[in-house]
């Protein structure tokens, strides 16, 4: 099948030109089968998403034409392999831990590479709004990331029913009155949230922003407490389990 040619603004460097298909997450990290992607717009139409999760099937695996060839191949060579390895280590607990439970998981990984891959995936999931993370992502040694926070949980693979990639969602915490802006990707074996602005509440999510404290070539072994949370509804950041 002939691949279509797509032009637009690269979500990482901000250059306009031909775009390549970016798998988010990388194809080798459980993203080589068709996926059901949530379509938040359908929520407004009052569909019964619990009995009939609305979305569209993406036959290529999750992703879109979002990055220029240069950025796509730089992410693919510098960060994707470390992410794929990290994801593989986390898939077993995501499949076996009870819903809502947590475990202290011992992982061997390249923290900075993994963090950069998560940030790159969130850039890819967001609309182009300027190369906010260009320097951080296009220089593998750069650690000057303006301190956005990255929050992670395992994604409960027994209960989850939908994948989600939501760019820049605004939230208002009714209890604290806090405003916030975050982007979410829910795809096996993680739920990841990139805090873009504000947003204090992070129940059951593990802050992994400290991954930035490592250098590009540093590998570490660490025990990280992760909760196992399901993605059932199409709402970004909602990890409510609903009995089927
Ligand atoms: Zn680019």
Image (cartoon, grey):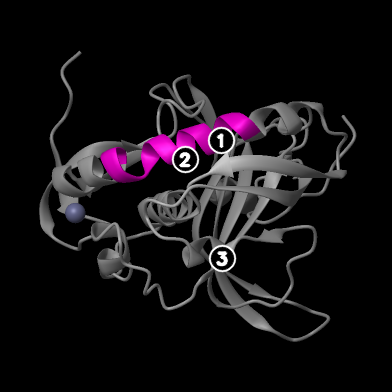
User: Which element is circle 1 on?
Assistant: helix
Tell me: residue 13, above or below residue 111. Answer: below
For the residues bearing labels 3 and 1, Cβ distance under 8 angstroms = no
Earlier sequence position, callout 3 versus callout 2? 2
Image quadrant where residue 32 sits? top left
The residue that disc 2 covers is 83
Left or right, 16 with reference to 142: left
* Quarter of the image that includes the N terminus: top left
Residues shaded magenta: 76-89
Q: Quadrant of ligand 1?
A: bottom left
The residue that disc 3 covers is 209
Circle 3 residues within 10 Å: few <14, some 14–19, many ≥20: some
User: Which element is circle 3 on?
Assistant: helix
The residue that disc 1 covers is 87
Could you say which is closer to the camera, residue 43 or residue 31?
31
Circle 2 residues within 10 Å: few <14, some 14–19, many ≥20: many
From where the camera sits, is residue 77 visible?
yes
Q: x%, y% of residue 6?
A: 16, 40
Q: x%, y% of residue 230?
A: 76, 40
Tell me: residue 55, above or below residue 234. Answer: above
Image quadrant where residue 236 sits? bottom right
For the residues bearing labels 3 and 2, Cβ distance under 8 angstroms = no
User: Which element is circle 2 on?
Assistant: helix
Earlier sequence position, callout 3 versus callout 1? 1
For the residues bearing labels 1 and 2, Cβ distance under 8 angstroms = yes
Q: Residue at x 41, y 55 (%)?
A: 116
Tell me: residue 224, above or below residue 91. Answer: below
Spatial CA distance of label 1 from label 2 is 6 Å
């Amino acid at each position: 099948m002939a691949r279509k040619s797509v032009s637009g603004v690269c979500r990482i460097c901000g250059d306009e030109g031909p775009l390549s298909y970016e798998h988010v997450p990388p194809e080798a990290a459980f993203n080589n089968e068709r996926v059901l992607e949530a379509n938040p717009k359908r929520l407004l139409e009052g569909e019964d998403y619990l009995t009939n999760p609305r979305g569209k099937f993406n036959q290529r695996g999750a992703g879109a034409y979002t990055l220029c060839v240069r950025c796509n191949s730089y992410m693919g060579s510098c960060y994707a392999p470390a992410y794929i390895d990290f994801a593989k280590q986390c898939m077993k607990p995501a499949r076996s831990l009870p819903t809502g439970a947590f475990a202290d998981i011992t992982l061997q990984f390249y923290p900075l590479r993994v963090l950069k891959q998560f940030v790159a995936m969130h850039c890819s999931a967001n609309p182009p709004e300027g190369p906010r993370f260009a320097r951080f992502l296009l220089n593998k040694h750069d650690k000057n990331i303006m301190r956005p926070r990255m929050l992670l949980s395992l994604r409960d693979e027994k209960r989850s029913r939908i994948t989600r990639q939501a760019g820049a969602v605004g939230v208002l915490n009714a209890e604290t009155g806090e405003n916030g802006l975050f982007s979410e990707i829910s795809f096996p074996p993680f739920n990841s949230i990139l805090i873009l602005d504000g947003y204090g509440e992070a129940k059951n999510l593990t802050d992994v922003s400290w991954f930035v404290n490592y250098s590009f070539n540093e590998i570490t072994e660490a025990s990280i407490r992760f909760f196992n949370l399901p993605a059932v509804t199409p709402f970004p950041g909602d990890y409510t389990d609903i009995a089927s």
